[in-house]
Amino acid sequence: MQVRQFSCGIGYPPKPEENPVRFSFLYTKENDKQEVLAREGETLLEVAHNNKIELEGACEQSLACSTCHVILEEEIFENLESPKEEEEDLLDLAYGLTLTSRLGCQVKVTRAMEGMLVKLPSNTRNFYVDKNKLDLHK
């Protein structure tokens, strides 16, 4: 699997002495689970990038795309603040939308997320790339 370089996040996971939150990302396409270490307060997108998880985040957390779409466990989803209207609008454009879908750039890690499983959809929709493929950039 090719790992891309991303621009948001610190660039490395927390060290054990930082008392990290541990959970996993699941690449649904390959059914490949990767454990990660996270700092409380980081977004799921930052955690993914710090741990070399391939989660795009094309808009660099500006809430302008849906490429960091993740699927959360129901218990975790239910304990989050409701998404803003802008996030809901972008989620409507996400590939593989579910009832527990959120944008990774909008979900901040808490200690309660210890042990959770975050699913990554098998595909994403990147409208910048897609419009160029379809010759819609005019």
Image (cartoon, helix red, strand yellow):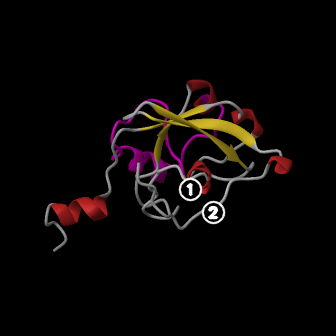
The percent position of residue 43, horizontal first and vertical second, equals 62, 52
* In the image, farthest residue toward the bottom: 138
Dot 2 or dot 1: first in sequence order is 2
Circles 2 and 1 in contact, beta carbons < 8 Å = yes
For this view, does 138 lie left or right of residue 118?
left
Residue 71, placed above or below residue 41: above
Image: magenta residue range: 78-104
Answer whether residue 82 is magenta in the image: yes
Could you tell me which residue is drawn at 52 percent across and 49 percent down?
A: 53
Residue 63 x %, y %: 48, 59
Indicate the secondary structure of the residue bearing disc 1: helix
Q: Residue at x 49, y 64 (%)?
A: 5
Residue farthest along the right direction in this orientation: 17
Name above or below for residue 65 compared with residue 95: below
Camera-nearest residue between 28 and 92: 28
Residue visible at 74% across and 53% down in the picture: 14
Quarter of the image holding residue 10? bottom right
The image quadrant of residue 2 is bottom left
Q: Residue furthest top?
A: 75
How far, Cα to Cα, is label 2 from label 1? 7 Å
Q: Return the residue nearer the eye: 15 or 86.
A: 15
Q: Which mark is residue 11?
A: 2
Q: Quadrant of residue 112?
A: top right
Q: Residues within 10 Å of mark 2 (few under 14, many from 20)?
A: some
Q: Is residue 74 magenta?
A: no
Provide the residue designation for mark 1.
49
| Amino acid type, callout 2 | Gly
Is 116 rendered above or below residue 43? Answer: above
Q: Nearer the viewer, residue 98 or 114?
A: 114
Query: Quick one: SS at disc 2?
Result: loop
